[in-house]
Amino acid sequence: MEVESSHTRSAAVFEPGLCKPVPTSATSTNSNRSVYSDITPGQDTHEPVDASVLVELKGTKEWVRRQLVEHKATQLARQQDVADNSTQEEVNASIVELQSQLQEQSTKLSVQELVLERLQCGDVLSKFLFDSPDSERTEEPSDKEKGKICDMVKKQNELVFELGKYHKDIQDLQENLDEVKKKSFEQQVRNRELMTLLQQRKEEQQQRSQEDSNDRVKMLESKLGEAMSEISRLQHIYQALMVGSQVHWAQDPDLQELMISLGTPPDI
Amino acid sequence: MAAEQESDMPEVLPGEILKPFNKMPCRDTATVLLVGSYGTGKQQLAKAMVDLCTDTGLKLQVRTTTSLPLPEENTDTRPRIDYIVFIIDLTNRLSFSTVKSAVQCVDVEYFLGRACFVVTNAKGTSDQCVEMEEVSRLADMYNTMYICGATKEGHPDERTTLANQLLRLVEVSAGRKNVSPLLLDLTCRQLSFQEEQPEFYTV
């Protein structure tokens, strides 16, 4: 068994700036953190070091909290007994329910965290831009810094608006797609019904044509039989007529041929 | 390990089963175990994952093995295994049987978002001796996802993409992201049954 490991530089900090509670996405926290490290006034050289240490500690705290939650959840799961006599379907149904509950709770928590983050950001931003200088701060933030922040806020607004538009477009497209899928499904169901009907009709038709042909043959055969018996009756009648008329049919070749043909039974 | 019939499979002792929660986790550290027979490209994949990690601040340790259970002598020094990757090569029957026997030595908790199957040589069916259906049946049995990719030298981009995907999963299972592995597993596969689609008749 072989082992490979990576060598890292000093740990890159993903974690948020001072004013945010929980890291949710690395990109947003990185960009916001850079704003504060550039613009936050009145900082001396020791503060950035303290900030990174605090951030590291916060990250560690969150990591420990997540590990604790996971371990507790595992422990709870191990303590629960699944009834042995439950069927596969019951187990699957309970798994589906639990999965949907987990998804719901996670979504709620994420939304709450996002809302809290935005409120805190907004609060700090408004304090930074609009509050009058107090005894703790030595100087007011310069117009240049304010202008920078205002531009960023404007850009954020534009991006959010665009995002909203895209979201709405995607929602509309999704609705259309769902409708089309539903229609296609209904169409497939109708097609299937029609195909079964068609197949049934075809089978019926085949059956009928077979029966018909049987009946027809029998009818034709009976007609043929009748015709044959009629012919033989007529033959006998002619024969009797010729014999009864005392004509010398043997002397005439035509009559002779006729007599002989009347004697042969009809054959097809 | 030679290919064995299921009836000849040696019984796995409880102590040999790999468990995710029997050791303490480490901050900013993750350990991945790649399980696969010889020739499945474990070394190249391990190198790709380690190379991608150098900028992220994560101390990644990649361990490779050709079979499970792991040897007892390293049990004390071995760190907690955060993620297990089972590598199946569709052109190598032995790799599939190795994985089939290895999954029995892994605790069920790994199959809740801390393990996955990687399928290589999935393109081109001429050389394949393992059916994709068999792999998908195995993945369904263990309720775990499988990723198709390439691990060998001829496909560096695909290998990097695969390493990226695995790294994201490893970060989640190591607790680096604000998402639990179970939640991620939930989004990958759900046990909801969709209405059966009607078949087309041909007349």
Image (cartoon, rainbow, N blue to C red):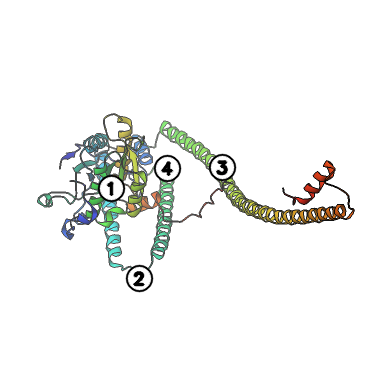
Q: Residues within 10 Å of mark 4 (few under 14, many from 20)?
A: some
Same chain under badges 1 and 4? The reply is: yes
Q: Residues within 10 Å of mark 2 (few under 14, many from 20)?
A: few
Q: Position of residue B36 (x, y in %)?
A: 23, 43
Q: Earlier in the sequence, mark 1 or mark 4?
A: 1
Task: In the rendered structure, find residue A59 and report the number of the disc placed on it.
Answer: 1
> Which callout, 3 or 4, points to the residue nearer the camera?
3
Q: Earlier in the sequence, mark 2 or mark 1?
A: 1
The chain identifier of the residue carrying mark 4 reads A
> Which callout, 3 or 1, points to the residue nearer the camera?
3
Given contact means CB atoms under 8 Å apart, are the residues at marks 3 and 2 in contact?
no
Given contact means CB atoms under 8 Å apart, are the residues at marks 3 and 1 in contact?
no
The chain identifier of the residue carrying mark 3 reads A
The chain identifier of the residue carrying mark 1 reads A
Given contact means CB atoms under 8 Å apart, are the residues at marks 2 and 1 in contact?
no
Task: In the rendered structure, find residue A85 and report the number of the disc placed on it.
Answer: 2
